[in-house]
Each structure stands twice: as structure tokens, then as C-alpha cells.
Image (spheres, rainbow, N blue to C red):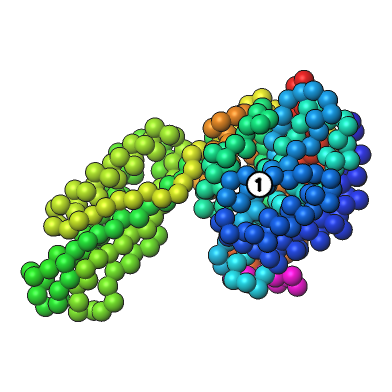
Amino acid sequence: MNGEQFLQEAKQYEEQLVKDRRYLHQHPGIGFDIADTVAYVKSELTAMGYEPQDCGKAGVVALAGGKKPGKVFLIRGDMDALPMQEEADVDFASQNGYMHACGHDMHTAMMLGAARLLKAHEAEIEGMVKLMFQPAEEIFEGAFDMIQAGVLQNPAVDAAMMMHVTAGMPFPPGSAVIMAPGISASACDFFEIRIQGKGCHGSMPEQGVDPIVTAAHIVLALQEIQSREVSLHDSVALTIGAVQAGSASNIIPDTALLKGSLRTFDEEVRQKVKERMQAIVSAMGTVYRAEAELIFGSGCPTLNNDAEVAGSIAAYAKEVLGMRGAFTTQELTAMAGSGGSKKTAGGSEDFAYVTQEIPALMVALAAGQPQMGYTYPTHHPKVKFDESALASGSALYAYAAMRWLEEHK
């Protein structure tokens, strides 16, 4: 199997890749509400000769290979968008109030491209490739839902990888950055703090219980965790991003609501901080005569890259993209003069649930250089992605899966 020839084959599908991506971009859905996207994916897979299966609330699974005995390698692409109005200067912008500002339309299109390549080379696959089309990544619920529905079973998956496009990278579009072994993305926990007080007129505060004062003390007390209870060597980002209470300047309201997120890189630290948050919220409510409740919502664990899979994929990526088209994070930090030290990302990714179950890897794919006008970051209403990266991503998905299976008979 020749990597460069594989990439050239993928480029023959570029027109279809762009067509797929733009349709998906113009018809986004959010969370598990992605019926249009799911229908499109299943229709395209069926036309290729696959028998796509529903998995969980809105996931889709397809299998390639099976002609030869071997292991099972999984590739994942997420399909959901964000609840934001698009402002990007493109002639195929979404008009429904949602936007693929994180590039999941690119991921889904690349997965469809990989499916075409895998179908064309199906007789050569040493085992099986499982294609995981996932919903609800943005709310950190889709991967867990599909795992609960059996995506890693029947047949059981031995290893996996995912890719995430990134705009604003200095590398040519289609360049791949293979994450270093270990944790590369933080755990995330979204939470709400609901405070029940007793409303009254602002001129008679003694007749009420002020939930705003309670909320203010909770916000300040939570910051003490980071400054006095977490080691210098551990990273914690505890953010209160929303404070909602009252509507009049002279009325003490009945309730207050705080919304926030917690990000950590260590599961023990994560649990410790969550326990301390519970204790602080409860205590502050008691001190200020209010009822205060901390409720954790959706979230995901740390994303842990497997050393063996990372080493293998790094080699395969260089085979298909060339020595100047694929880098490990260790190589990049060494070139930057940081001595090869590893830096982790502050963002989170619910593929982390997969990495907690089986050996797996995250790969970043450059999709827009700043000097070419791709200056906005992901999750920005004006972000754009360079579609010339689609063929490289499709080729890497399919080639890496086949090469891993070939070397792990």
C-alpha cells in the first residue's frame, strides 16, 4: 500500500468532498437534533454499498472490510453544529440559526471520503474498519451515548482515532499534528448553582433572604479552591460564565442562578474540586440563610492518547502526507525551541470517553492559514475552513486505519 498514491486517489473525490461538506454546512443541527445530517450520511453510505446502522439517539455506524480476518479499528467523525448565527463570508452559509463553527461538517465530509476509499480497497482490509458518525459532541453527550448503545462492541473495537480541523494554523491545509501520548485535552464539567432566597423590597432587606448576596459569596469562595487548595503542579480552570438574578433595581429577588464550567487534567483533582464545590455551595447557603444547590450537568473525562497508537499513526501520517505534512507535538515543540516539552489544550473533546475504554488517539488537521484569510478561531461566528484539507483528512482516516490493521494482525 503506497501512501502517496492513496492521497492522490483521495484527491479524485475532491469535488464530491466539497459537495458533501457544503450541503452539511448549509443544513446544520445541534446536539442530538441532527435528522437532516443523519439522513444525508445514511443515504451517501447506502449509495456506496454500505449498510449503515443507527446507534444510540442519533449516531450512525458502518463497517468496511471483513473479507479477511483481523482486528477492528474505529474512526470517528462528529456531526453536530453550534447554536449560533453564522457571520462567515461564504456563499453557502447556514440560514437556520445554527452554525458549523467547530468544523464538524468538515469531519463528516472527510469520513464520507474515507468511506469511499475504504469501499474501493475493501478486499485489502486486514480485518474491519468501523466508521463512527457521532452526534452531540458540543454538549459532551454523543460519544457516551454511542458507547452505551454498543458502538465499541459487535464487533469489539481494538483501537481508534479521530481528527479535528483547526483554522488559523500556520501549516499548509491538510497538514496533520499527531498528539503526544498522554492527556491532550482537559476533562470538562458544566454546572449550575441554584439559589433560593426570599424576595422583598430593597428598602426592607431584613424581611427577605438575598440570593444575590449569597451568589456573590459563592463566586468568591469558589475561587479559593484554585488559589489555596490545588497544587502548583495541577491545572484547574473554574469559571462562572453566567449570573442571572432579579429584574429591578429596588427589589430583592427570590432566586439567583449561576452557570459555569470546570476543567481539569487529572481525574483525582477533578473529583476533589467537585467535592469541595459541593461543600462550599452548601455552606454558603447556610451562612446566608438561603437554599443553595449545585447541579453538575453534561461533561467528559480527560482525553488520553495511547502511546502505541500515537507512534503508529505518526508513521502512517508521514507515509500518506509526507515528512513535511505530518508532525508530532513533540517535534513541533522541539522546533519551537521549548525542548520538546508537551503542552496540553485547555479545550475538551468527548472522544475522551472512547480513550477511556480502548487505545485511541486524537489528530489535529490544519484547515486554514492566517495569511490566506483564515484568521478566526473555531466557535467564532466568522470562522472559515479551507476545503483543500478535505482530501488529506479523508486519506489519513482510511490509510491509517488500514495500515494499523495490516501491522496488527
Kindly identify which residue carries mark 1: 54
Q: Position of residue 218 (x, y in %)?
A: 25, 54
Residue appearing at x 44%, y 41% in the figure: 264
Q: Looking at the rendering, in which quadrant would you find the N terminus?
A: top right
Residue appearing at x 73%, y 53% in the figure: 41
Residue 60 in the image: above or below residue 312: below
Q: Amino acid at mark 1?
A: Asp
Q: Position of residue 315 (x, y in %)?
A: 77, 30
In the image, 309: left or right of 260? Answer: right
For mark 1, does the 10 Å Cα neighbourhood hold few (<14), some (14 to 19), or many (20 or more) residues? some
Span colored in magenta: 85-93
In the image, 270: left or right of 30? Answer: left
Q: Nearer the viewer, residue 375 or 120?
A: 120
Residue 170 in the image: above or below residue 124: below
Residue 400 in the image: above or below residue 71: below
Residue appearing at x 81%, y 33% in the figure: 65
